[in-house]
Image (cartoon, rainbow, N blue to C red):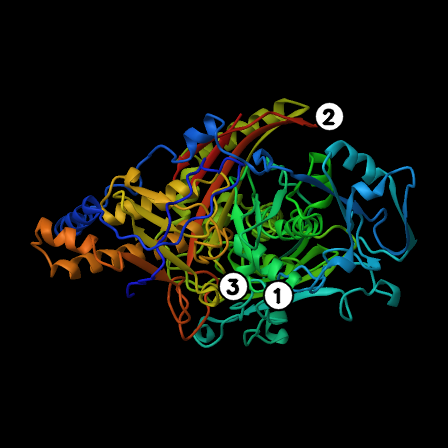
Amino acid sequence: MGARNRLRAKGPSLPLRGFGLQGLPRQPRYNRVRSRGRCVATAVLIAQDLRRTTGAAVLIGQDIPRLDGLDKLAGRAAYVDDLALPGVWHGGTVRSPIPRGRIKRIHFDPAVNWREFVVVDHRDIPGRNEVKLIDVDQPALVASEFKHKHEPILVIAHRSIHKLRDALRAVRVEVEPLATIFDPRTPLTPELIQYKSDNVFKRIDIRKGSADILSANHADVSSADAQPGAAVPHAAVPHAVVPQEFERIFARAAHVVEGEYVTGPQEHVYIETQGMVAHREDGRLVVCGSMQCPYYVLDALVHLFGRPRDAFRVVQTPIGGGFGGKEDYPSLIAIHAALLAEKAGAPVKIVYDRQEDMAVTTKRHPSRVRHRTALDRDGRLLAMQIDVLLDGGAYVTLSPVVLSRGCIHAAGPYFCEHIHIHGEARLTNSPPYGAFRGFGAPQTLFAVERHMDEIARRIGMDPAELRRRNLLRAGQALATGQVYRDGTDLVALLDRALGEGLYEERRKAHAMFNRTHPYLRRGIGMATFFHGSGFTGAGETYLASEVWLEALPDGTVEVLTAQTDMGQGTTTILAQIAANRLGLPPDCVCVAQPDTSRVPNSGPTVASRTAMIVGRLIEQACDDLLGQLSQFVGGTGMSATDVSAAGASATGVSATGVSATGASATGVSATGAPAAGVSATGASAVRSEHDFPGGTAASAVQTPAAPHATQSEP
């Protein structure tokens, strides 16, 4: 990677607590600066020699204080609701009163002086009334027909938040009810069809046959996790396994076990609710708020307003928790705040209270997973037929990629030569479902683990032994055809979670206890899993993520990415990766606050990709920087004068890490599209005691037993 010598300098990084007098991040000044960071240049070149001779990596794996911890503990971190802009107005939303209908009339109570308020409806949208994501089926403000309860119809702003709340209650929306659907299994009639011809947001088929066809047949999930707006294939390309062959396997099997497993919606309950502030600054519309993906918000604003990207600036404020809930929904609330700010000619803040947040924002997709499994007499898997059905809610949002990841993980970390997975995400008139930690995989992994327990019960085998016989070994292929190459011994991992030799003793003790207690029951639950990090298939290639690294005049190195820290430690992790690669102490590396006017698009903070994917790009940029410094001084053995000359060069010193088309940041090759370039594996075990008549269970405290294995005990 060559240097990215830009004429504009990177201004100083926005401190984690650093906001202007009015509570907003200061706009950096893009005058050229020259890096005179002699201590940086000297340190990184010494580190290069040290690494060459010893291979030392001194920071990765160390427990260092969180770089943002003190500001949060001291209350100095300024969350979106802490931003105090002069003359700020407060915004709120008028929503649909029933799950589906058509607007007939909107009544404004004449007792309210509406001239004091700013009211925005769909007619005030200058561009397209669409929230840009994977599809554009969701309106920012309903024009006529709505598809779920609490769908936004109007947004209103006032200087007084108390008057605003009274005004929201003074608006009545008169509607004509339309037919609704809440169970995705409901047979369709013409009046229930609301998306294309069948209400199906996405279909996926993954078929795996014998080992000799794996090299030539890969399930085509390469675009399923592409960035919003990219084309998503309607269905996966099947393997060459014909239904007749599949059915013959079941006919010859010693055991055939079927089961159906259901999960419901799940609320994120992040501590900080959704919130955005919008205002104009230097001719641009600036939006600040709690978000995981600043460039998603930027793209949504560009699409809706019909203006160029440089007409907007999106800044991420510290986030009080996200868990996926602040991936796609912030685009909608950012649009609402921006529309109000434009019409009011003043800053506008929208912050949901807990009741509104829980009622209107996305949740984890409800699921229904059916398993049909063929096994031989020894309990080894012969064939798995899995049907995955997701309730997508009223609009597409992220359902296609949630379904993709769910299907990829549906067979679990088990080896089976013949697998057929069919998945569908369908429309209902519930509020849209969206991202939540695991992104579809928890639903399908729950199903396959419960099914393994059911198989063990039906064929009379110990559930741990059943898992041991079928867990993936190195060189075996997953359902997608991707070969498992992780060095982790999954059997040893499971045994460690079970207590390293204590499992049989505990099972016998539990059996004796259960025979002598009429109401109490004790048991051991277990689960194994794998989870891919980063976008699936070629998704990371399509993203072409980019990070920047720059030496600053004060002797520090700045990392510039769009990755957000929502409590998972991103700020510290990225600084630690850079410091480790450069041989610097962590306090000599700073991480810029995500701001689309000054950081590159390194992709969204989703899919467990930050440390593994973006972290690798940062290492590439560090290597680029080390190479540049060596070139400045002509190799090793440089003098202090040489180092100073390098730091004082007219172009400064900067480096870039890019995941470009054709790159292998996620292991995507020219011959196939693996489900994920990097995966984590794990096992958990839980000991519990249940009071069946009372319906209660003893509490369990989880304690780590291994890096990827956990035990829970009362």
The residue at the point 80 percent across, 48 percent down is: 149
Please tell me the numbered disc located at residue 162: none
**Residue matched to label 2:** 693
Task: Mark 2: give few (<14), some (14-19) or many (20+) Cα within 10 Å.
Answer: few
Q: Residue at x 36, y 49 (%)?
A: 559
In three-dimensional space, the C-alpha distance between marks 2 and 1, rounded to whole angstroms, equals 40 Å
> Which residue is labeled 3 in the image?
479
Tell whether 32 sits left or right of 167: left
Can you say whether 401 is above or below 581 in the image?
Answer: below
Indicate the quadrant containing the N terminus: top left, top right, bottom left or bottom right: bottom left
* Residue at 52% from the left image edge and 48% from the top image edge: 315
Residue 33, position in %: x, y?
30, 52
- First in sequence: mark 3 vs mark 2: 3
Label at residue 250? 1
Q: Amino acid at mark 3?
A: Ala
Image point 56% across, 42% down: which residue? 322
Residue 412 visible in the shown view: yes
Q: Amino acid at mark 1?
A: Phe
- Distance from the alpha carbon under mark 3 to that under mark 2: 42 Å
The number of numbered discs placed on residues in the rendered structure image is 3
Q: Nearer the viewer, residue 374 or 333?
A: 333
Q: Is disc 1 surrounded by few (<14), some (14 to 19) or many (20+) residues within 10 Å?
A: many
Quick check: 324 above or below 389? above
- Tell me the mark number nearer the camera, choosing from 3 and 2: 3
Judged by depth in the image, the label closer to the viewer, 2 or 1, is: 2
Q: Secondary structure at mark 1?
A: helix
Q: Earlier in the sequence, mark 2 or mark 1?
A: 1
